[in-house]
Image (cartoon, grey):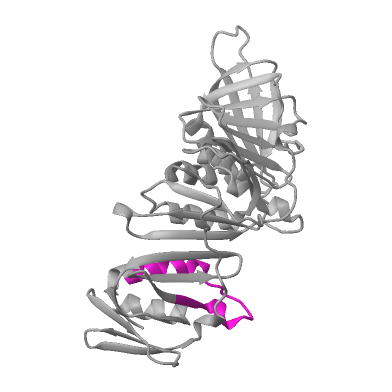
Amino acid sequence: MRVTCLQETLQHALDQVTRAVATRTSLPALSNVLLVTDNGRLKIVASDLNIAITTWIGASIEEEGRLAVDARLLTDFVHTLPSGRVELTSSGPQTLMTVTCGRDRAEINGIDAEDFPEIPVVVDDVESTSIDPAALREMISQVEFAAASDESRPVLAGVLMRIEGDRIVLAAADGFRLAVREGRMNRALLSPIDIIVPARSTRELARLLGEAKSEVALYVTPNRSQLIVHFSGENGEGEVEFLSRLIDGTFPDYRQIIPNDFSTRVEMERDALLTAVRRSSYFARDNNDAIRFDVQTTDDGLDPGTIEVSANAAERGNSHSYVDAAISGPPVQIAFNARYLNDVLGVIKTGSASLGLNGSNQAGVIRSGDSDDYTHVIMPMVIGAQ
């Protein structure tokens, strides 16, 4: 192999793919990146067997070849190089890569490319669909945090992705909360997709999507075991392919969890509620993160109602904040987990939010004030003395 490319381009590509490098593994190949000449470009691949990231960069190819080398060592060394052209060379059967930039030079031991895991590729007869990258990134950000952090129930450690026609639904739940976001695809699917993607994979995908400048193509491998996402950067440069294994199982029917109607409905400014919740959360830390909502209407029904947001720390003090709201229905006192409230209010992008309640012991439903595309269900906590 003899390849020349720009230091800045190589550095950026390595930074992208090394997020998929295994940090703790018994398979030495997984701590490497694979470099392959591919139709006049340099392809760089990393995988930990759960996710794989592939990127292609422009390069001058003088001699074709492929080699896997230590990912961290190569990345760290390239980061220290000055701007300019970097030459990557290897020769014969040797698994040694020479990296040269001006007068700077390093030799990095590698492994045979055949020892690197095979990465599935998109085949022509697999149906695909596409979506705007910013839309998919926002959808992921609004649901992935609600997935379970442990894998005792694997399906709850993932994000449901359901695509029917030109509609897409992402959903995540951990047994205490449920987040559902609906969106629209750019291109409809003839055959529906119903898969569960590990939450960690969706977070890595969202990071990559921040650089996507083209629509994002989605594929599912024929055996339904992997999701492949493909997109390009500015002017078609920086082509990236992301692959994730899928979780086998059946996701709970989220539609049965979401209440259809509410006895009390509350509309308020999202920022005002988030500020009150954050203020109370400092005191809630010593009380199982419990924050209490006291929803009260006015006697005449003409003035705005009020939500009293409070928390009590027996040894440290208490906090009481008030948020004006439009309230219909009877008063309610209910408690929620402060972290869950912070999470959902932090990802609502609109200026207002709505809260639907059915008493103190039933789940509350939070939505964006001007849209039904996003729904978040939170189970209540037991109200103690405040």
Q: Residue at x 32, y 54 (%)?
A: 236
Front residue of 232/313: it is: 232
Looking at the image, residue 273 lies above or below residue 284:
above
Q: Nearer the viewer, residue 245 or 353?
A: 245
Instruction: Report x, y in % for residue 345.
Output: 54, 38
Is 88 located above or below residue 306 in the figure?
A: below
Up-down relation of residue 104 to residue 284 (above or below): below
Q: Quadrant of residue 373?
A: top right
Q: Is residue 97 magenta?
A: no
Does residue 89 appear left or right of residue 132 in this picture? left
Find residue 16 and report its horizontal and vertical position in percent: 42, 65
Res. 360 image quadrant: top right
Give left or right: position of 12 versus 130: left
Q: Residue at x 47, y 42 (%)?
A: 131
Q: How many marks?
A: 0
Q: Quadrant of the N terminus?
A: bottom left
Give percent across and percent down for residue 186.
Answer: 46, 38
Residue 109 in the image, given as x and y percentages of width and height: 45, 90
Q: Which residues are magenta?
A: 10-34
Q: Say which of 171 and 220 sits in front.
A: 220
| The C terminus, quarter of image | top right
Would you say residue 317 is visible in this rendering?
no
Residue 184 visible, this orientation: yes
Judge by depth and name the residue closer to the eye, 255 or 117. 117
